Amino acid sequence: MQRLLFIVVVLFVAWKILAVWGKRLVSKGAGAEDFSRFSARSRDRRRRVHEQRAQQAPELLACSTCGTLVPTDRAVAGAAGLLFCSPECAAKGRQAKRGGG
Ligand SMILES: [Zn+2]
């Protein structure tokens, strides 16, 4: 009889400990909110990543001849402050200006 009482007490204590542990997991762990598209935390994280990428992306300029967007560091500068995507486009731009197509 004493052994049965001891087992019941041990099970009761174990159940209480697990209940407290479970409550802590529910309040601090990754719940449905963390995977939600509308979660404030993940939305802020996405916004931060987006802003970082926008800062890192180089500025694009349209080629004066063909209109291709080129990063400013790769653009070929032509006469009269015009920018081209390649030396070929710069040559075409010069020809078009002379009218000797
Ligand atoms: Zn071009």
Image (cartoon, rainbow, N blue to C red):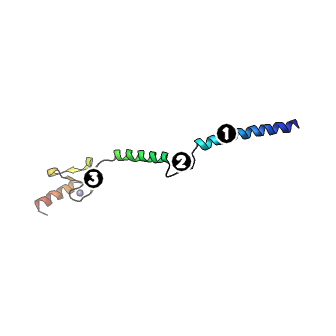
Q: Nearer the viewer, mark 1 or mark 3?
A: 1
User: Image check: 97 left or right of 27?
Assistant: left
Q: CA distance from mark 1 to mark 2?
A: 22 Å
User: Image check: 96 left or right of 50?
Assistant: left
Q: Quadrant of the N terminus?
A: top right
Q: CA distance from mark 1 to mark 3?
A: 60 Å
The image quadrant that residue 11 belongs to is top right
Q: Position of residue 90 (x, y in %)?
A: 19, 55
Determine the secondary structure under disc 2. helix
Asked if ligand 1 lies within 8 A of label 3, the reply is yes
Q: Position of residue 67 (x, y in %)?
A: 24, 58
Residue type at mark 2 is Asp
Residue type at mark 3 is Val
Front-lying residue, 59 or 44: 44
Q: Quadrant of the C terminus?
A: bottom left
Q: Which residue is mark 2?
A: 34
Determine the secondary structure under disc 1. helix
Question: Residue at 16% of width from left, 50% of height from top?
Answer: 81
Q: Nearer the viewer, mark 2 or mark 3?
A: 2
Say if 96 sits above or below 10 in the image: below
Label ID, residue 20: 1
Residue type at mark 1 is Val
